Structures are given as C-alpha cells and as structure tokens.
C-alpha cells in the first residue's frame, strides 16, 4: 500500500526540467559530502547562483556558519519548511541508491560542469528567442542593433561553454 501511495505522490509532482534535476542532485551531493567539504561546496553553489529559492535560503545560512558542519545541528536551526527541503534533498531515494561516498569528488565536479553547461545553454536559448521576436516585429530594421547585441552575447556564452570543463573550486 505504501508503494502505491508513493507512486501517487510522484505522479502528482510535476516533471522537473534538466536544470532543476541537476540542482537537486547538487544539493543531494552537498549534504552527503564529507563534512570538511560542505561549507566550501555550499560557497561554490552560491557563486553558481542556484535557482531554487529554498536552496538559496539554506545556502545562505550554511555559508554564514563558520563552525564545523554537522547535518543534525544545522538542520535544527532551520525553519520547518527549509528543514523539510533539506531532508528531501539529503535523503533523495533515487540518488541514495546509486551514491558511493568514495566517488563524491568526481561526481561533484561532473555535476557542477553539467549545471554550468545547462545554465549557459538556457541563456543562449533565451537570447535566440529574443532575436526571433525582434526579427518578427513589423519594423525589424530598427531592431538590428538589439539583435547584434544579443548575437554578441551568444558568442561570449558559446566561448564560456567551451571553458566549462575547466571549472575548479
């Protein structure tokens, strides 16, 4: 009976976009990291600008914490809704099945790269949509300067995309 309840709950949850999935996985990795890595890893996620609002609230509190990280003591400082999100991310059943603590560093670097790539690709797609909208306007000649500006941003983002594999923290 519990498995049918779980399937119903999963069916009610909207399908996550790839960028949201990788963010959830990064949060899972963060809260399953070796304790000495957690604060530094949280700072990396803060720099990368995670887009999940509750994650940002948790990361903010975590990076303000200067002491040693212990999940239980950190969780006790959080509001109930943030605590629930933290527990959901840190004990995610799909990720726990596959997770091997010995591979944490490798998984972390790979996932950071994937997040950066997805984020840049999303920005390029948004700029392309803006260009198409500008070109479809009746007097599109007035928009040439704006289109050129968007195209130069795309070129810069494509260059960043080539650099993503070299991320260090």
Image: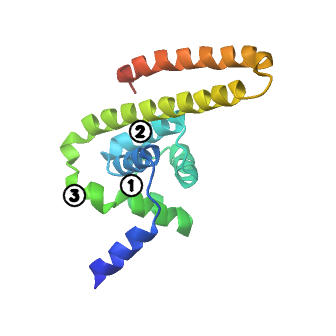
Q: Can you tell which of label 2 and label 3 is closer to the viewer?
A: 3
Is residue 69 in view from this perspective? yes
Which type of secondary structure does the marked residue at label 3 adopt?
helix
The image position of residue 168, as x and y in percent, is 38, 24
Disc 3 or 1, which lies upstream in sequence? 1
Relative to 106, residue 152 above or below: above
Relative to 54, residue 60 above or below: above
Is residue 76 in view from this perspective? no
Q: Nearer the viewer, residue 113 or 133?
A: 133
Disc 2 or 3, which lies upstream in sequence? 2
The image position of residue 68, as x and y in percent, is 41, 47
Which type of secondary structure does the marked residue at label 1 adopt?
loop
The residue that appears at 61% across and 28% down in the rendered structure is: 127
Point out which mark residue 70 bears.
1
Count of marks overlaid on the render = 3
Would you name the residue on which mark 2 appears?
41
Residue 51 placement: quadrant: top right
Q: For the residue carrying disc 1, how many other residues have a C-alpha within 10 Å: few (<14), some (14-19), or many (20+)?
A: few
Point out which mark residue 97 bears.
3
Name the side, left or right, on which 162 lies relative to 151: left
Give the CA separation, mark 2 to mark 1.
14 Å
Relative to 6, residue 41 above or below: above
The residue that appears at 32% across and 46% down in the rendered structure is: 33
Which residue, as the protein is rendered here, is positioned at the far front?
138
Badge 3 vs badge 1, beta-carbon distance below 8 Å: no
Give the CA separation, mark 3 to mark 1.
22 Å
The residue that appears at 52% across and 51% down in the rendered structure is: 55
Q: Can you tell which of label 3 and label 1 is closer to the viewer?
A: 3
Q: Nearer the viewer, residue 162 or 152?
A: 152
Residue 144 placement: quadrant: top right
The image position of residue 156, as x and y in percent, is 54, 15
Q: For the residue carrying disc 3, how many other residues have a C-alpha within 10 Å: few (<14), some (14-19), or many (20+)?
A: few
């Amino acid at each position: 009976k519990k498995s049918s309840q779980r399937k119903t709950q999963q069916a009610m949850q909207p399908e996550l976009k790839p960028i949201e999935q990788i963010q959830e996985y990064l949060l899972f990795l963060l809260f399953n990291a070796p304790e000495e890595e957690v604060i530094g890893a949280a700072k990396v996620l803060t720099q990368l600008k995670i887009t999940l609002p509750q994650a940002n609230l948790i990361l903010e509190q975590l990076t303000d914490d200067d002491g040693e990280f212990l999940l239980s003591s950190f969780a006790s400082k959080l509001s109930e809704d943030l605590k629930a999100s933290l527990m959901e991310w840190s004990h995610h059943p799909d990720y726990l099945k596959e997770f091997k603590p010995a591979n944490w560093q490798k998984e972390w670097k790979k996932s950071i790269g994937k997040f950066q790539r997805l984020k840049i690709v999303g920005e390029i797609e948004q700029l392309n949509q803006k260009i198409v909208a500008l070109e479809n306007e009746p007097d599109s000649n007035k928009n040439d300067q704006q289109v050129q500006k968007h195209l130069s941003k795309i070129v810069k983002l494509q260059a960043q995309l080539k650099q993503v594999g070299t991320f260090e923290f």
